[in-house]
């Protein structure tokens, strides 16, 4: 399945039965230099729209929302030590992996083309 | 000059856009917050080489030299004792002893030259006009700051005379027929200069500096992190009409001549409170904090003495990430008896996070004295 994009500027990639979540290049550019990342606890059960992660740049703090209901099963331990990865390689700098009830719901989010139109 | 956004534009607006700046509204002006280098690298570049800042939004005002006494009636600062071609930090106070604005005052021989904050410029000028005869608002000049350890090397290529200046000296120089007013000062904690330049040549002057390998354009984002690391207050955040100079940690800017027992004791708005606080101290003070973790504590974060329970003992007035100290830093208004090293807690997103009271500045200053 191709990568999908949320209106909150997160990208979603399906990996086996898991959904991998990160922030888009557009979001990382808008945020500026990222200096702090707080990851969710592994095992946390979340509802769609829950604030699960915090990202702070030199300018401001913002939340990363759970794109779907499910459970956090893995987090990217490299990010809190090296937050700059989010700016350097936003599509590789994943935040967390989720086990979701309905994997097909990922498809409801935007395609790459639709996201390009969305950010104008 | 105003564009269709209603924001005022400096004479360098087109150059900022050409350089790829991200422009934002600031105090009614359309200003560059960052360039493609980004805030973090711009900050580090300024500490390592030289950064060029457009600070033309700041107000430039001239007073006749005869106005020394009239200005002293508005500021708790020794203006009469300011030497020829010397500059000094000052603040306008109100009757309650609070701060209306902070400013720089230079003695340029036959006149005083003032630089005031953009956001306060209109009110400052009205305040000056109400109390000081002969106020001239400088029109048609922009203001640049060149800051960093290589600022002298870079600027001296255009104006060799600046190399002889010391911290807080001021001088005039001719560059390509234009009269430049230079001070060796700034708002970054680095050695450097502020240069008032006629608008007709300011773009050429800025381009001549930017062509040098040491010099990069720096936006307001890095200006803020640089001044915060240098422990300097920002008007409207760390200091305001509710904060006295003593509470603000600015007692150093009030010279002996204006203090109790001095040659021109008092005689400025709020003198009762300010002179009393200079002797007895203030109950609260602007204090530096280093959060122990990586999470920044930003403006508005409430500070507690305990990890749980209790009421806030103060709040963060400026906070963020310090690129040169590679960690978060904040200034807060807190009980004055907190000593460096004391442990307090900032409530960030509902969690009490530990922070240590720290001496200011966070990053050592490097002026050429």
Image (cartoon, coloured by chain):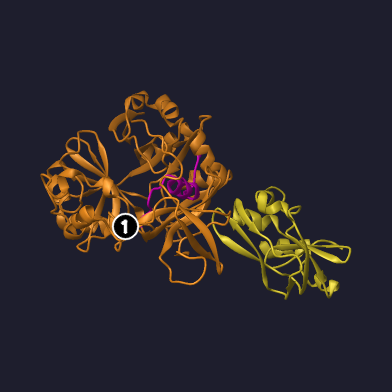
The chain whose colour is yellow is: A
Q: Give residue A54's position: percent from left, percent from top.
A: 63, 62
Q: Determine the chain carrying the residue at label 1.
A: B
Depth check: B37 or B352 in front?
Answer: B352
Q: Give residue B292's position: percent from left, percent from top.
A: 54, 53
Q: Give residue A39's position: percent from left, percent from top.
A: 68, 61
Left or right: B271 with respect to A94? left
> Residue shown at 71%/70% (left/top)?
A66
Left or right: B6 with respect to B108? right
| Vertical arrangement, residue A5 with respect to residue B195, above or below | below
Residue B131, image quadrant: bottom left
Q: Color used for chain B?
A: orange
Residue B119 in view, yes or no: no
Q: Residues within 10 Å of mark 1 (few under 14, many from 20)?
A: some
Left or right: B29 with respect to B275? right
- Magenta stretch: give its range: B216-235
How many labels sit on residues? Answer: 1
Asked if residue B225 lies in the magenta stretch, the reply is yes
Q: Give residue B109's position: percent from left, percent from top.
A: 18, 35
Asked if residue B318 lies in the magenta stretch, the reply is no
Q: Quadrant of the C terminus of chain B?
A: top left
Residue B330 in view, yes or no: yes
Q: Secondary structure at mark 1?
A: helix
What residue did someone put label 1 on?
A: B120
Depth check: B256 or B292 in front?
Answer: B292
Depth check: B221 or B275 in front?
Answer: B275
| Vertical arrangement, residue B152 with respect to residue A104, above or below | above
Left or right: A68 with respect to B333? right
């Amino acid at each position: 399945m191709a990568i999908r994009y949320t209106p909150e500027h997160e990208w979603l990639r399906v990996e086996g039965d898991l959904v991998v979540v990160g922030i888009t290049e557009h979001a990382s550019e808008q945020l500026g230099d990222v200096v702090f990342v707080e990851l969710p606890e592994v095992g946390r059960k979340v509802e769609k729209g829950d604030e699960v992660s915090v990202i702070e740049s030199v300018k401001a703090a913002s939340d990363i929302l759970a794109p779907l209901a499910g459970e956090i099963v893995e987090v990217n331990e490299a990010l809190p030590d090296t937050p700059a990865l989010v700016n350097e390689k936003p599509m590789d700098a994943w935040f967390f992996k989720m086990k979701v009830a309905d994997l097909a719901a990922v498809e409801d989010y935007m395609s790459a083309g639709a996201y390009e139109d969305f950010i104008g | 000059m105003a564009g269709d956004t209603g924001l005022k534009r400096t004479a360098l607006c087109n150059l900022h856009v050409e350089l790829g700046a991200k422009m934002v509204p600031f105090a009614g002006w359309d200003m560059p917050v960052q360039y493609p280098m980004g805030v973090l690298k711009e900050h580090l570049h300024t500490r390592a080489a030289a950064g060029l800042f457009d600070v033309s939004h700041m107000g430039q005002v001239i007073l006749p030299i005869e106005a020394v006494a009239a200005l002293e009636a508005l500021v708790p600062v020794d203006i009469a004792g300011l030497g020829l071609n010397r500059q000094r930090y000052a603040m306008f106070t109100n009757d309650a002893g609070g701060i209306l604005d902070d400013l720089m005052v230079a003695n340029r021989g036959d006149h005083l030259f003032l630089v005031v904050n953009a956001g306060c410029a209109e009110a400052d000028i009205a305040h000056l006009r109400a109390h000081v005869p002969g106020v001239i608002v400088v029109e048609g000049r922009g203001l640049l700051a060149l800051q960093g350890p290589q600022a002298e090397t870079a600027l001296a290529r255009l104006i060799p005379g600046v190399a002889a200046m010391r911290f807080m000296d001021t001088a005039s120089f001719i560059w390509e027929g234009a009269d430049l007013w230079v001070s060796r000062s700034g708002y970054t904690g680095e050695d450097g200069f502020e240069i008032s330049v006629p608008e007709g040549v300011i773009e050429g002057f800025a381009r001549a500096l930017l062509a040098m390998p040491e010099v990069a354009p720096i936006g307001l984002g890095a200006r803020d992190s640089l001044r915060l690391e240098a422990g300097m207050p920002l008007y409207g955040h760390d200091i305001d009409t509710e904060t006295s100079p003593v509470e603000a940690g600015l007692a150093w800017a009030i010279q002996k001549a204006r203090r109790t027992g001095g040659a021109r004791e008092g005689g400025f708005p709020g003198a009762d409170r300010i002179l009393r606080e200079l002797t007895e101290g203030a109950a609260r003070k602007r204090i530096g904090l280093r959060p122990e973790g990586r999470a920044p504590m930003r403006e508005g974060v409430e500070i507690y003495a305990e990890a749980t329970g209790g009421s806030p003992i103060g709040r963060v007035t400026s906070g963020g990430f310090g690129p040169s100290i590679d960690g978060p830093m904040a200034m807060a208004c807190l009980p004055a008896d907190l000593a460096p090293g004391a442990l307090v807690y900032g409530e960030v997103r509902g969690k009490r996070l530990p922070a240590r009271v720290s001496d200011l500045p966070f990053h050592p200053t490097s002026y050429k004295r």
